[in-house]
C-alpha cells in the first residue's frame, strides 16, 4: 500500500531551496512521486495511507562517509583491542549501526574496523536479522608497519582496525583479501594520525603502494579512500588516484588544485575535534591531544579554502573516535556552516553529493524511482540545521526496512 506525505516542506537533495507544500508518495522501498502538492496526483492513490506533515520537512536520509563501527567514542580504544573478542566486537558494532540509523543516517561507509566486523554486520543487516543503515564496508584499513592503525609497539600481536603491509605485493594481497569479502571500499593510511603513536603528518604508504591498491579496487568497481593529515601524503594519494581524501588537515593550495583537476572528494570529519573539547578532562592521552591541536587550525583553514575553490565536500564524521559517539553525527553539518556553507549546501554534503561520491545512485535524492530512504523532520533544517541533531524530532523511513526485505546491491 502506498503512503502519502502531504503539505510539508521538501528538501529533495538537489534544489537550492526547499519546496513548500509538497507531496511525496512511496510504496515499499520506492518513491513514486516527490514534488509540488497536486491534488490530482494524490488522488491517483485512493487506498494510500495519508499523513499530513504540515510544519515538518521531508528530506533524504543522511549519508555518513566515514564511520568506525568498532570504536565507541572512548578516550582510548586500545583496552578494547586487548580485551574484546571478535564476537563481542561484532555485537557492539551491530548496536552502533542501529544508533546511526535511528539518528537519520540511512547509508554509512565504514572506514576501518577491528576484526573486519563491518562485513558481518552488513550481512546481518542485509539479511534482515538486525536493523541498520546500508553499509558500505572497508574491513580493516591498510597501513605500514609502525603506521597509523598499528597501535601496539614491539612484537605484541593484537587485532586492531588496521593491517600492516610493506611493499606493493603485500598491499595488493591485502586489497584482494578485502575484495574476496565483498568490500565496497578500500581504506588506505597515507599518513600518520592523531590516535596512534608516531608523527601525525609524516607520509606512510608510498604513492606506488596506493596506486596498486587503486588499480586492484578499480578492477572490481570498488572505490578507495585515504586517511591523510600531512600535505605530502595528501598529494601522494591524489596522484595515486584515490577518490576520497579523509580529513585533509594540511591540504594546501597545490593540493586543492590537484583535487579540482581530478575525480576527488574531501571528507573533512570535523566531529573528530570533539577530542579537544572533552579530552583534557576525559582521559585522552596527552600525545593525542598535542597532535590534534596541531592539526586543528590548519584543518579549518584548508577546508574553508577548499570549499571556496569548489572542491566537492562529503559529510564524514569519523564517528567512534574519542567523544565522537554513534548517533551524534549530524553536528558535522552544523560545523560546515562555520566555514561558510549555507545550511542547504551542508545538507547536500550528506545527501546528493555524498551519493554521487560513493556511486549510490538510488539514494541521497528524493525523486520518482529512487529508494524510499527519507526523514520526516519536525522543523526546518534550512532555518535551523541543528534540528537534525535532535533524534526526538526525526522519523526515519528506511527503504529496505519499509519493504521488509534485504538492502539492494550497494554498488552503482
Image (tube, rainbow, N blue to C red):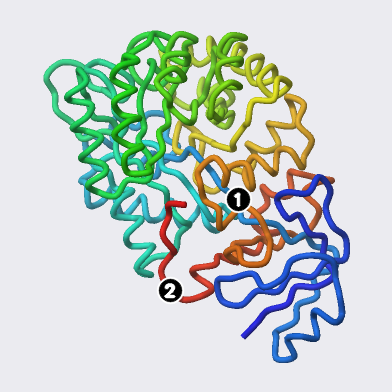
- Taking the spot 49% from the left edge, 68% from the top edge, the residue there is 400
- Hey, which quadrant is residue 286 in on the image? top left
- Taking the spot 20% from the left edge, 18% from the top edge, the residue there is 166
In the picture as drawn, the residue positioned furthest to the left comes out as 155
- Hey, which quadrant is residue 402 in on the image? bottom right
Residue at the spot of label 1? 62
Q: CA distance from mark 2 to mark 1?
A: 20 Å
Left or right: residue 58 versus residue 410 is: right
Q: Position of residue 293 (x, y in %)?
A: 54, 13
> Viewer-proximal residue, 161 or 136?
136
> Viewer-proximal residue, 409 or 139?
409
* Number of the label disc, if any, that sits on residue 154: none
User: Compared to 228, does 61 lie above or below?
Assistant: below
* Number of the label disc, if any, that sits on residue 405: 2
In the picture as drawn, the residue positioned furthest to the bottom comes out as 47
Question: Alpha-carbon neighbours of circle 2 within 10 Å: few (<14), some, or many (≥20)?
Answer: some
User: Compared to 101, does 235 lie above or below?
Assistant: above
> Viewer-proximal residue, 241 or 51?
241
**Which secondary structure lies at badge 2?**
loop
- Hey, which quadrant is residue 257 in on the image? top right
- Taking the spot 56% from the left edge, 28% from the top edge, the residue there is 266
Left or right: residue 173 versus residue 79 is: left
Q: Position of residue 27 (x, y in %)?
A: 61, 77
- Taking the spot 64% from the left edge, 25% from the top edge, the residue there is 311
Q: Position of residue 321 (x, y in %)?
A: 45, 32
**Which secondary structure lies at badge 1?**
strand
> Viewer-proximal residue, 280 or 203?
203
Left or right: residue 375 versus residue 411 is: right
Amino acid at each position: 500500500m502506498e503512503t502519502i506525505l502531504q503539505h510539508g516542506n521538501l528538501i529533495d537533495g538537489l534544489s537550492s531551496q526547499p519546496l513548500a507544500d509538497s507531496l511525496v508518495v512511496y510504496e515499499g522501498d520506492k518513491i513514486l512521486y516527490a514534488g509540488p502538492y497536486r491534488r490530482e496526483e494524490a488522488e491517483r492513490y485512493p487506498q494510500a495511507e495519508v499523513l499530513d506533515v504540515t510544519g515538518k520537512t521531508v528530506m533524504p536520509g543522511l549519508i555518513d562517509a566515514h564511520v568506525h563501527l568498532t570504536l565507541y567514542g572512548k578516550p582510548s580504544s586500545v583496552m578494547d583491542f586487548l580485551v574484546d573478542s571478535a564476537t563481542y566486537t561484532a555485537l557492539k558494532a551491530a548496536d552502533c549501526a542501529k544508533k546511526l540509523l535511528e539518528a537519520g543516517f540511512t547509508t554509512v561507509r565504514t572506514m576501518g574496523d577491528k576484526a573486519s566486523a563491518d562485513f558481518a554486520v552488513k550481512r546481518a543487516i542485509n539479511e534482515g536479522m538486525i536493523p541498520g543503515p546500508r553499509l558500505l564496508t572497508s574491513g580493516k584499513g591498510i597501513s605500514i608497519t609502525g603506521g597509523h592503525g598499528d597501535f601496539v609497539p614491539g612484537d605484541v600481536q593484537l587485532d586492531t582496525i588496521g593491517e600492516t603491509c610493506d611493499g606493493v605485493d603485500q598491499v595488493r594481497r591485502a586489497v584482494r583479501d578485502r575484495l574476496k569479502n565483498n568490500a565496497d571500499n578500500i581504506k588506505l593510511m597515507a599518513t600518520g594520525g592523531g590516535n596512534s603513536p608516531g608523527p601525525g603528518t609524516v607520509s606512510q604508504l608510498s604513492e606506488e603502494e596506493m596506486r596498486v591498491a587503486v588499480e586492484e579496487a578499480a578492477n572490481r568497481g570498488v572505490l578507495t579512500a585515504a586517511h591523510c593529515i600531512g600535505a605530502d601524503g595528501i598529494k601522494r594519494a591524489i596522484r595515486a588516484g584515490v577518490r576520497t581524501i579523509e580529513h585533509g588537515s594540511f591540504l594546501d593550495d597545490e593540493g586543492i588544485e590537484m583535487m579540482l583537476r581530478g575525480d576527488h572528494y574531501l571528507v573533512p570529519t570535523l566531529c573528530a575535534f570533539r577530542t579537544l573539547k572533552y579530552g583534557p578532562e576525559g582521559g585522552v592521552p596527552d600525545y593525542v591531544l598535542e597532535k590534534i591541536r596541531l592539526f586543528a587550525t590548519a584543518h579549518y583553514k584548508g577546508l574553508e579554502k577548499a570549499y571556496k575553490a569548489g572542491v566537492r565536500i562529503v559529510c564524514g564524521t569519523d564517528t567512534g573516535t574519542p567523544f565522537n559517539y554513534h548517533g551524534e553525527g549530524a553536528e558535522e553539518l552544523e560545523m560546515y556552516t562555520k566555514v561558510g556553507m549555507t545550511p542547504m549546501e551542508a545538507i547536500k554534503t550528506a545527501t546528493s553529493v555524498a551519493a554521487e561520491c560513493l556511486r549510490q545512485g538510488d539514494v541521497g535524492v528524493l525523486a520518482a524511482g529512487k529508494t524510499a530512504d527519507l526523514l520526516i523532520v519536525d522543523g526546518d533544517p534550512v532555518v535551523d540545521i541543528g534540528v537534525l541533531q535532535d533524534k526526538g524530532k526525526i522519523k526515519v523511513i528506511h527503504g529496505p526496512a519499509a519493504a521488509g526485505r534485504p538492502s539492494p546491491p550497494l554498488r552503482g
